[in-house]
Image (cartoon, rainbow, N blue to C red):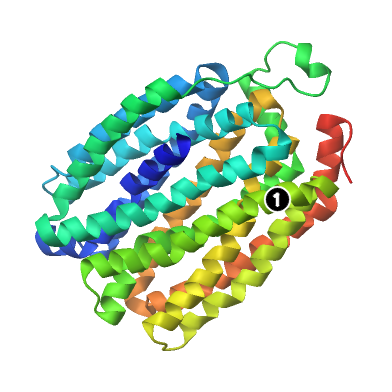
Amino acid sequence: MLFAVACLNYADRTAISSVFPLLKQELGLSDVELAALGSAFLWVYALCSPFAGMLADRYSRTRIIIGSMLAWSAVTILTGLAADSHTLILSRVLLGIAESAYLPAAIALIADHHAPSSRGAAMGLHLCGLNLGLVAGGGLAGYLGEQHGWRVSFFVLGASGFVLALIASRVLEDGPRPRPHTAAATAPRTPILRQLMQLLRTPTYAAVVVEAMTIAIGVWMFFNWMPLYFRETYGMSLAAAGLSGTMTLQLSASLGILVGGFLSDRIARAGAPRRMLFMGICYLVSAPCLLVFYGKFPAVTVSAAIVLFSFGRALAASNEDAILCEVIPADGRATAYGLVNTMNCLAGGAGIMIAGVLKSGVGLSTIFAGISVLVLFSGLVSLAGYRWFMPRDMRRIHGTGAS
């Protein structure tokens, strides 16, 4: 069920990038204003995510998920009614507020229902839904925009959200929340401020935050600007550019996340810190693929390189949530995910805006090629976490398991 909800979640948030040319034509938006649409969403989403995580650690995760679905579906329909850039930006702000409640509650709910032996695979399947949502949203918005105007796609996506929320309300159930492995299991609930300080004093958590933020800068540049890149560089139609700009990234990412989730669980049998080693290696191997943007290659060559990069990046990312489950007590996981979301989205929004400002000067090809440096850095941070941080943090939380 959460696979389907995740698909819709990302379809609603990213569909707008596939109709950028129509927004330029009808509303006269500049590149910087187009960038502001993506950044406004991500920055507001970022600010709200920690509070959403705290709520999901204290109240029904299922009810929070359903409420978030209803809210973001209503906002998606309102987006289709926007008459100017200011109204569009306001709708993106509201969407950021509405969608921020979903991921922390959903990931924590999955952790409640799955033990470590299946957690990586389960979270991988959920992440796969997010990635397929990018493809569905991009392709649908591009096709409907070309055939019926850009507004229709938002009406269709919003209406679908209400239907899916009704189904989800009958299917989703709050799971048994695992008890921590330490004596803290019998202690009163940790106050919010102390809980935040515990997160900040967990080196593995800090390493994952830095790694994820760095990747988010580059990935959100891709998400926001790739359809326009294919449109301007290769003269593709809106539907083709929307599919090419999302499919090359997300179908391979979906496969990578599914494979990575199962591999992560298998690798963790030799010691949970091996998840972080696997993550670092995948980043290092995938980084050189982006150097293809330095040359002038046919669209098929560029697409193949993006597929390889996206697959490797997804193999790495499939480990993040499972790693956090190993070093964060059960009653603080949603808060931890909320903070990760915050930092990712602040970084991603900055990446979108930086690309929008630099686009006219250096071009999207140079910007995309430069992302390889960010991926390389994330790989090194992950290896450092494996070598020095995660075994120690696991001993502190679990009292064992640092092999």
Secondary element type, mark 1: helix
Q: Which residue is labeled 1 in the image?
A: 264
Tell which of 372 and 69 is nearer to you.
Answer: 69
Tell which of 102 and 335 is nearer to you.
Answer: 102
At a point 55% along the width and 35% down the height, the residue shown is: 107
At a point 57% along the width and 52% down the height, the residue shown is: 258
Whole-percent x, y for residue 119 in the image: 66, 38
Residue 161 in the image: above or below residue 83: above
Please identify the quarter of the rendering in which residue 334 is found.
Answer: top right
Please identify the quarter of the rendering in which residue 150 is found.
Answer: bottom left
Q: Can residue 36 be spotted in the picture? A: no
Whole-percent x, y for residue 296 in the image: 41, 89
Please identify the quarter of the rendering in which residue 288 is found.
Answer: bottom right
- Name the amino acid type tagged 1: Ser
Residue 5 is left or right of residue 268, and the answer is left
Residue 329 is left or right of residue 246, and the answer is right
Residue 170 in the image: above or below residue 324: above
Tell which of 168 and 17 is nearer to you.
Answer: 168
At a point 29% along the width and 64% down the height, the residue shown is: 242
Using a 10 Å C-alpha cutoff, classify the residue at mark 1 as few (fewer than 14 neighbours), some (14 to 19) or many (20 or more).
many
Q: Which quarter of the figure is the N terminus placed in?
A: top left
Whole-percent x, y for residue 302 in the image: 44, 79
Whole-percent x, y for residue 199 in the image: 69, 34
At a point 29% along the width and 59% down the height, the residue shown is: 139
Q: Can residue 144 be spotted in the picture? A: yes
